Image: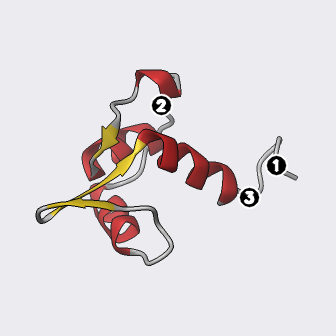
Amino acid sequence: MKQNNKPTAEMPQLLSAKDMSEHLGVSLCTCYKLLKQDDFPVTRIGKRRVVTREHFTEWLKNNTTGGKNNG
């Protein structure tokens, strides 16, 4: 998985599947599935699904497990 080391503050206010894909280093397909999950903080604008930067970072903090810093 390719990681993006961009600070969160440089991300757009509203993240599309493409933005999430670039930030997380996962496929677009994975991000589209994530946007359809009931527990994911999606905002709908017409037919488009986006997530606010704030909700995205909060969701990441609450749903991250494993790794060196997370036990």
Element at badge 3?
A: loop
The residue drawn where x is 35% and y is 65% is 35
Element at badge 2?
A: loop
Q: Give above or below for 44 relative to 20.
A: below
Q: Does label 2 or label 3 sit earlier along the sequence?
A: 2
The residue drawn where x is 68% and y is 57% is 62
Amino acid carrying label 3: it is Thr
Q: Give above or below for 35 relative to 55.
A: below
- Residue 1 visible somewhere in the drawing: no
Distance between mark 2 and mark 3 Cα atoms: 18 Å
Could you say which disc has been placed on residue 4 in the image? 2
Q: Does label 1 or label 3 sit earlier along the sequence?
A: 3
Element at badge 1?
A: loop
Marks 1 & 3, CB-CB < 8 Å contact: yes
Could you say which disc has been placed on residue 70 in the image? 1
Identity of the residue furthest to the bottom in this view: 38
The residue drawn where x is 44% and y is 40% is 53
The residue carrying mark 3 is 65
Q: Give above or below for 10 relative to 40.
A: above
x, y percentage for residue 27?
A: 34, 55
Q: Residues within 10 Å of mark 3 (few under 14, many from 20)?
A: few
Q: In this rendered view, identify the residue nearer to me: 24 or 15.
A: 15
